[in-house]
Amino acid sequence: MIRWRLAMRLLVRNRHSGEQRILVAALVIAVAASTAIGFFTDRLGRGMANQSADFLGADLTLVSPRPVDADWFREARAKGLQAIEALKFASVVVGGEALLLSSVKAVQDGFPLRGKLRTALAPFAADAETQALPRPGEAWVAPRLLTTLGLQVGDAVEVGTHTLNITRVITFEPGRVGNPFGIAPRLLMRMADVPATNVVQPGSRLSYQYLFAGREADVARFRDWLEPRLGPSHELVGVKEGRRAVGSALERAERYLGLAVLAAIVLAGVAVAMAARRYSERHFDMSAMLRCMGASQRDLLGLYLPQLLVLGLAASAVGCTLGWVAQYGLLYLLADLLPATPSAPHAWPVLAGFATGLITLAGFALPPVMRLKDVPPLRVLRRDLLPLPSRAWLVYGAALAAIVAVMWRYTGSWPLTLSVLSGGIALVALLSLLAWLLLLLSRRFNTRVGVAWRFGLNNLWRHRRGSVSQILAFGLTLMAMAVVALVRTDLLTTWQQQLPADVPNHFAFNILPDQVEEFQTFMEQAGVATAQLYPMVRGRLIEINGTAVRKAVTKEARNDDALNRELNLTWTTELQADNRVLAGRWWQPDDTGKPRVSVESKLARRMGIEPGDELRFAVGDQRFTTEVASIRSVQWESFRPNFYMVFPPQVIDRFPATWMTSFYLQKAEKSLLRELVARYPAVTVLEMDRVIEQVGRIFRQVTLAVEYVLVFTLLAGFAVLFAALQASQDDRLYEGALLRVLGGSRRQLRAGHLAEFTALGGLAGLLAAMGTECLAWVLYSEVLHLEYSFQWPVWITAPIAGALLIGAAGYWGTRAVVERSPMLLLQNQ
Amino acid sequence: MIAARNLGKRVATAAGPLDILTDIGLEIQAREAVAIVGVSGSGKSTLLGLLAGLDLPSAGEVFLSSYRLNDLDEDGRARVRGELVGFVFQSFQLLTGLTALENVMLPLELMGARDPRDQAAELLDRVGLAGRLQHYPKQLSGGEQQRVAIARAFATEPAILFADEPTGNLDNVTGERVIDLLFRLNRDKGTTLVLVTHDEHLAGRCERLIRLEAGRVVADVTEVHSA
């Protein structure tokens, strides 16, 4: 009790000491970053999940070819979920004289459970959200259905044996996002009307859809209950699976947030370690004195550990509070983008925040502070006596354990954590070596520079062990900042490239071959730029290397969408802008007319297709064989025309083809569409603007989050900077005083310090550039799946930023050295 | 009270082992005031460190009261120090972050004393610093700092007081006053005093003088004189 009281008193008395402040500040930063991002990603994640749910029309959708056990439905309701049923089937719809294969969806009250339908009173007219559904006897249809059948709102259509009256046009339907090509247009009707259609017969291809929505935990419980009961023909689509439209971008963003927080925590940890080391060193005398007075090693631990614990708890509390506030700031910033009532915050980010604070403290501060118990009491007589240095394995082991713990939380995977960690250790080892080399090299310039620089560089060399660790610390800090900033820029650029302001938001297909030129001219005259026009030939993949495709592929791949429907085959000479050839080679001029094909990479992987394989296709009743010449990656999120199978020219042009293209239209130009379909009735226009808007909104949210997290990493970087300056402060004060006693002027000293820190910063920057290059390469290729290119700007900006930043901070941090009276300083030693 | 037998201290140096103390034998009785004198490097402070149990000898044994220090580990010796020993150092060794009062309270708090504040304040009053309780060491003169250190050393009423060059950092007049105080308290409390100094005048105020040269005792003289 007494010790506890004394510990608290010492803690309070120490509150003005620089190292204790830095220790607390660094911890606060780590905890605030972790908590803010914890809260933020949790709430935003759930916000995004809600938006994804809006996309899906439900939190969870079960798709089955047959009706499912009624118990499942009861179970869902028992678990507090809303549950409704919908039936989807393909049916030829008759309107007037024309026929069209449509995708019919029959729904009940409550549909959709999430998100809103948007409808209009005429094709391409202004639309609005609606809560309503078609009434019995009514049908709402996609604009394409009207234009293709030459109908208008108010006309009748026949579905099976039942006639429905078209009352509205659907412009957005939750749950209908994905590959927009080749989809039969939607007809939405009442479930109650289905029996009258007589479409549901034994053997009909039906898709029963069960939509569930409710509280997150209830949905998760139901999902856990349901999953073991599913058969191979069931498909369960949750929010995660349903995110495909924005999938990879979100996943990258989540990884990035994790990465940035991790960088902030590790940097803060380094600052904590430095501050704790200085804290420990400054308490050597006190510990020796206390030992003289009879304090045992346990007494000393009993004195210091509670202080550390209280510091950790207090800093964690402050950090959590800041994180909490920061998160509200963010919610305020994002008010427009988030649901009106964002999901209530969970408590776990607070717990995680405290855990982060205490783990960081234990990992980085405990080993140096533990040293205090080993201070020899004889130090009261001989000040040069130091406790044995902490064992290296203890210091690094504890820090590593802390990093692993924190990293695991963000990666959630042991192999990834361990491989990142071992990579990190290798990198640090390599950089330490490089830091030595840089320092050695800097010596060579020593004789060719002015007095101040010589003083500065000499200083670096004289304290070379300290200098190397400072170069390393600053270098790692700059590196972390550079990588986080670099990745941010590249992520944003990637997204912007995916969704530039004029990303095509409309697709026109079914353009007849003899209309292609006319169509182009029409669009040109209207002032609308179209993408390249691609021919589309409908065909099926039937054999791989002479084996029927269903036998050639793995069991899982057999249900692949691409096998169960006709594919759009196309030909072109130019590789699409967002495609990359991963294996094999793209068409050369002499490929024209040769039976070759380029296959989309994910499909190729699922089917086990490689360059050199032979693929056999069926188009109508004709068959032909081609050799796989290349495997291509495709960015499906780019909203540009993309194809699984691309042929060189003059291979499939003998088959009947229609053409397609995409273009960008502003809202005000929408009326052009009416003119377009009037002039080319066969052409089908698909409006993607709503979907793109939604995706764009999610990207903007994520962008803000990304920038927000960067701030924490920068703050943590500054904490390291100041901790490192503080660490060498005592020696510098003493040396500075000595130099001034020996006749050095303030100006000389200042210039010397400036030179020293500028050199230190420059060298650290150079080191950071090397590290960034290594780390970014690994991150891009292994974690974020972005394309990596040599980051030459880093080689210029990092050393300059390092020199300026550390030069200025060092100059500022050592001003006490020149300002204080040398007498005072020497007396205090 | 204190006994050393065949005490030796050998340290390893770059030029091979170096004997700092060789074959020291001495006994100090309770309430005795002993000065250990010698030139710089004669081994005085090393001897003080060994006698106070701050360090262990390479050879021989040390007894403090009934304890054989060689038998104790560092924590054990710390316990003995807490129970028996007080220190005054040349460099005062006050904790800069604590006020004068808090510095004196520290050993009392460690001991678990009931009213450390009152006891400490009273002691500071006795050393003439009643008006300086809340001052930090930096705000005190050298003489005042050493008086705080003396108050601290006597706070736990130790049986033995070790003083290492207590006037080394003070001018003559101040040093004299501090020593007066030290001897007065020593007498009042009946403490055994072991004082290491190179100042012959100061040593002369002790009743017994042990002279070291090159790590050996060359003289051990007991005089009767007035302090």
Image (cartoon, coloured by chain):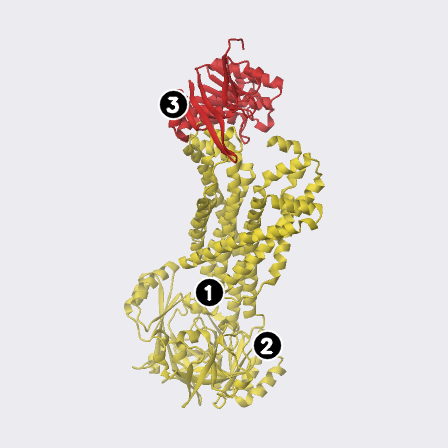
Chain colours: A yellow, B red
Q: Which residue is mark 2?
A: A669
Q: Which residue is mark 3?
A: B67
Q: Nearer the viewer, mark 2 or mark 3?
A: 3
Question: Number of marks in the image?
Answer: 3
Percent of width and height locating residue B173: 62, 17
Task: Give the amino acid at mark 1.
Answer: Gln
Percent of width and height locating residue B81: 43, 25
- Indicate the secondary structure of the residue bearing disc 1: helix
Q: Is residue A354 visible?
A: no
Percent of width and height locating residue A678: 55, 85
Return the chain for callout 3. Answer: B
Counting residues from the start of the chain, the first of labels 2 and 1 encountered is 1
Q: Residues within 10 Å of mark 2 (few under 14, many from 20)?
A: few
Q: Residues within 10 Å of mark 1 (few under 14, many from 20)?
A: many
- Indicate the secondary structure of the residue bearing disc 3: strand
The numbered mark at residue A51 is 1
Q: Is A605 placed above or below B201 here?
A: below
The numbered mark at residue A42 is none
